[in-house]
Amino acid sequence: MALKIRLSRIGSTHNPIYHVVVAEARSRRDGAAVELLGTHNPRSNRADALTLNVERAEYWISKGATPTDTALSLIKKARKAAAATPVA
């Protein structure tokens, strides 16, 4: 079972919102996912446009899941944002 970390579209027409999911490589884009890692709203300029569980993404990458190019850039962006915010 080859796994990929990729985007699954849930938004309406002309208003895309994506789930960042772990899914089988051969499944459909919006098909069944193994795990939901977060959401991404590309049309939002606010800081909450990306919510991603970086620990779970790193776990799946360590288990052999390969992120797509877009998912990898979102994971890097989330890592950078997590490192910039101080832990209270």
Image: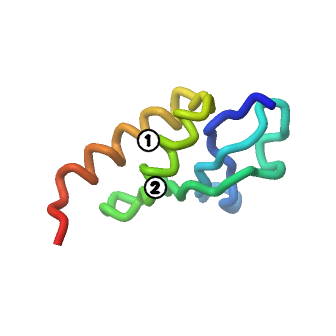
Label 2: state its secondary structure.
strand
Q: Earlier in the sequence, mark 1 or mark 2?
A: 2
Q: Which labelled disc corresponds to residue 16?
A: none
**Quadrant where the image shows the N terminus:** top right
Name the kind of residue labelled 1 in the image: Leu
Q: How crowded is mark 2: few (under 14 residues within 10 Å), some or many (20 or more)?
A: many
Q: Picture quarter containing residue 23?
A: top right
* Label ID, residue 52: 2
Q: Which residue lies furthest to the bottom in this view?
A: 88
Q: Residues within 10 Å of mark 1 (few under 14, many from 20)?
A: some
Along the viewing direction, whichever of 79 and 56 lies nearer the viewer? 56
Secondary structure of the residue carrying numbered label 1: helix
Coordinates of residue 63 in the picture (x, y in percent): 60, 34
- Whether 62 is drawn above or below 30: the answer is above
User: Are dots 1 and 2 in contact, CB under 8 Å?
Assistant: yes
Marks 1, 2: nearer the viewer = 2
- Provide the residue designation for mark 1: 74
Is 24 situated left or right of 80 in this image? right
